[in-house]
Image (spheres, coloured by chain):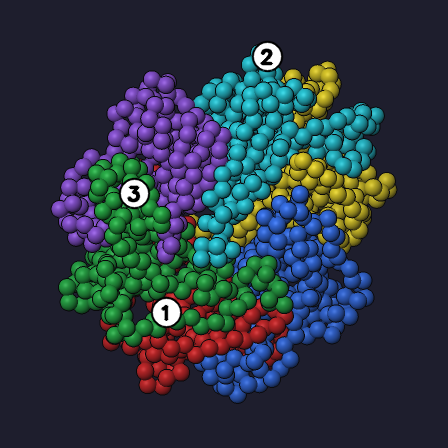
Chain colours: A green, B red, C blue, D yellow, E cyan, F purple
Amino acid sequence: METMLASHQGQVANLERVAKLLYKTTSSRQQCWKTNKVGSNVTLINVMQIPGLNTLGISIARIDYAPLGQNPPHTHPRATEIITVLEGTLYVGFVTSNPDNKFFSKVLNKGDVFVFSVGLIHFQFNPNPYKPAVAIAALSSQNPGAITIANAVFGSKPPISDDVLAKAFQVEKGTIDWLQAQFWENNHY
Amino acid sequence: METMLASHQGQVANLERVAKLLYKTTSSRQQCWKTNKVGSNVTLINVMQIPGLNTLGISIARIDYAPLGQNPPHTHPRATEIITVLEGTLYVGFVTSNPDNKFFSKVLNKGDVFVFSVGLIHFQFNPNPYKPAVAIAALSSQNPGAITIANAVFGSKPPISDDVLAKAFQVEKGTIDWLQAQFWENNHY
Amino acid sequence: METMLASHQGQVANLERVAKLLYKTTSSRQQCWKTNKVGSNVTLINVMQIPGLNTLGISIARIDYAPLGQNPPHTHPRATEIITVLEGTLYVGFVTSNPDNKFFSKVLNKGDVFVFSVGLIHFQFNPNPYKPAVAIAALSSQNPGAITIANAVFGSKPPISDDVLAKAFQVEKGTIDWLQAQFWENNHY
Amino acid sequence: METMLASHQGQVANLERVAKLLYKTTSSRQQCWKTNKVGSNVTLINVMQIPGLNTLGISIARIDYAPLGQNPPHTHPRATEIITVLEGTLYVGFVTSNPDNKFFSKVLNKGDVFVFSVGLIHFQFNPNPYKPAVAIAALSSQNPGAITIANAVFGSKPPISDDVLAKAFQVEKGTIDWLQAQFWENNHY
Amino acid sequence: METMLASHQGQVANLERVAKLLYKTTSSRQQCWKTNKVGSNVTLINVMQIPGLNTLGISIARIDYAPLGQNPPHTHPRATEIITVLEGTLYVGFVTSNPDNKFFSKVLNKGDVFVFSVGLIHFQFNPNPYKPAVAIAALSSQNPGAITIANAVFGSKPPISDDVLAKAFQVEKGTIDWLQAQFWENNHY
Amino acid sequence: METMLASHQGQVANLERVAKLLYKTTSSRQQCWKTNKVGSNVTLINVMQIPGLNTLGISIARIDYAPLGQNPPHTHPRATEIITVLEGTLYVGFVTSNPDNKFFSKVLNKGDVFVFSVGLIHFQFNPNPYKPAVAIAALSSQNPGAITIANAVFGSKPPISDDVLAKAFQVEKGTIDWLQAQFWENNHY
């Protein structure tokens, strides 16, 4: 019966499932950052791991930051994010929309909570050169999506026309070509 | 400009505020549980702490559990909850709606993630007699609300008619009166 | 064509169906209450009876109350309820969420309308020892759900741990065990 | 506190108010139909009577029909309606949208439930020449609105251009002028 | 992967499709109006043409008006419309809901923008006897629906009872019968 | 009355206002592109111009493109966009979210319709070196917002830390500093 109801609204069925957010050992996490250019990795539990989350409007992620690692500028196309620091310190920021493009930034310590409104570009950076940082982020969608700006702009497959990007970013086409030739690593798993 | 827009949709303004989720020292937290009958306390960051969260559909809480402490059976009238264990072990459960009232329970270890669908009765219990536990819970509303079942039923002000409760709970009116005379402590701050 | 559109939004198709809300004869209804411990029965028309209601956000119920019968404390996890008395008198109440748990109650006469906000614990009681009462309740979901508090807490299958419930309700485990041994009857059909 | 929260989401505050749906005596209701061209009157309880209903997405109405009275073709611009017959018999119908404009109709007896999907043109007619009928309708909005088609088209203030209406309704302008000169009585109170 | 996600939320998959809004040549459009009683035609791109639009809450239409042509009084049961004039001049109007049924009208010139709120009766008329007009309308649903009032009321299949319509429109049954015998042409394609 | 209702739901009041989308003469538009680095300008009609649009979930924009002009890569944080070409030709594209970052592109001719899903990075480019292009875009929010990627990342006020951007974009800090020293012009009005 609950299953039938769920096919109508999805609220109840298949929620008796346990997902793993922090399954990595410390050493395996360190291995992640070290082989990762931006020095961070994001582990998301969403409707793909727990199908019963469908329509329920929430998901949760753990983010691990190497010393000086960052979760580079990105957006969530379908969710607002609320983040809290579990370990270490984070320098975080977001930019408002046109025409002002105001940049707001804060240093967050353990236990601090901050919000990134739906669709705005934001980042987190671990300013400590010696210690890692860890955060938990919750998102207001069962399928929030993530768009790492540099990867989507310069690392898309196939690449975006360099004519378009050269004018948009006010650089030579050669610079765009060079950027597009780099390896743009995804830090979301 | 952003402020004006916010008055239309609330997405952007006043989000440059840092709230504190884990502000308590370990010793102050311990003091909380010890003087608390159920042995847990919930610290919620919602639209009351960060007004810019309005309409954004998310909030976050930290829950501290004493050894053998519990976050007793409760509901969130306006939110689904996704929880992850940060420290220790939790035995968690929820009950489905009429007519089946099926009880699902799981033991969650560090890093495990579990979902409580909007409005369902659920609880968490720390089965370890020696060690505390800590969890982070995210909720799909900026104002999720919490209703501790025992408190709302037996500790309301003024009390619900004992005639009504005696029949509903299949006990003597004297039992209801005794229950209503207890001190029903709120563990949500 | 309408059918195809409905698969995209569900608003139009399969709504030419008549459901029966008041199909019981007076005598069959009386039989219901008399064999029913709480002295009431709820007949709900939702998306299970009229599949075309899916996504349309409404359902309707008739509630019959024996003399001194009650619709015991319960919640609707996914809907606000608006109720109107058709026959007799009802004493109704609801309790607000933590931390206040304020109890509001009213006596409703024929034609009075009252609202129970989504997810709040509420009940209706027929205070008349001689006459039945009848009400119509509308709910803001095609699948509102109903959770009878006593049944979900003490009558779940399997039972919730008596350790958890004893602490939550401030009673002896023996009392919980006794409660869990009772027959918890569902008054929703 | 609840009041503050309500200003953020409106779910809880000011809901302890009783509105009157069936306040009319039988004789005063009869007086209504008799002086009313269409032979029906609608009494709606919405957010205007119970301000705390705001954002809760539900309202309720009572409809009284004289013998041979009708609630003429109308739409609710912001709500689906679910209706149940309390007394008498109703012949009800709705028309689907372009391009099919299919007309579905049913005869509803006491206790029957029927749905009118949001925005569709529908009506109810009491086919009994001797007996009145009564129905309860619930609507999926706290402010559903009602548009009586004939009144809005031919009785608007100021009138719609008769050039436009003559072509739209395929009649002479004189016919439109005659229609616009009638008294278009509102049966919603 | 995007495809799987889309099955959960529909935002991304199958959006790489181009639909045609203005595919008609001027001469074919003229042919349309000339054989069309109301002198207009509406071409809508919605979820039927671009399935990936599902749940995205938007669609777009082009409307062509012959000299003195009109898009006759109609409603969109599931969408607000925002319209802009591309060529020519339009006299537009809408009527508010009961009890006021106020009629608001404006003359729109090239580039003017106007809004028709969800579910309200509205029309556009090209007052120029020599020149056609063209408008673009966007709608806040992937499946807005359109109900041409005259067609739904007098041209439904099967026809609505002439007893009901005669009383609702305050005319003789013979007039209703005559109206129902006309050919009610749909101008939505 | 309508005004009071609007304060509860905003659907009806203050919608009798005409906004101007195409108010610019051809020569003033040309002047726009010529002094504009990206060669395009966007004129949006949203809730700021028509306050009654609040909560109605739609807005509309006109976009003018100089020969070889572009509307550079940007997102709308709160809306899906549906676009149609009025004059000329557009090469358009969007990039899907992590981890695939697939780039989809199309050439759109007059009358073609294309969709950019909420929050995804997208652009339009006029590939014709001699002729301008014009498009109408509708958005599924009364306040969609626009974030021009290059401007938000490199032209924010104050600038984002060059340490963060250098690592995120895999370039030298000097390159970031040079980019941040450019003039980042907003093409949204």
Which residue corresponds to mark 2? E129
Circles 3 and 2 on the same chain: no
Is residue A78 visible from the viewing direction of this image?
yes
Q: Please state, as top left, top right, bottom left or bottom right, where the C terminus of chain E lies in the image.
A: top right
CB under 8 Å between discs 3 and 1: no
Query: In which quadrant of the rendered view does residue A10 lie?
Result: bottom right
Q: CA distance from mark 3 to mark 2?
A: 48 Å
Element marked by disc 2: loop
Locate residue F27, reporting x and y percent.
33, 17
Locate residue C187, reporting x and y percent.
67, 69
Query: Dot 2, how many residues are within 10 Å of its Cα: few (below 14), some (14-19), or many (20+)?
Result: few
Circles 1 and 2 on the same chain: no
Looking at this view, name the residue that lies furthest to the right.
Answer: D130
Chain of the residue where label 1 is placed in the rendered structure: A
Element marked by disc 1: loop
Which residue is at a point 81% across and 66% down the rendered structure image? Answer: C27
Which residue corresponds to mark 1? A21
Left or right of C30 on screen, residue F47: left
Amino acid on which the number 3 mark rests in the picture: Ile
Left or right of C91 on screen, residue A30: left
Which residue corresponds to mark 3? F149
Amino acid on which the number 2 mark rests in the picture: Pro
Element marked by disc 3: helix
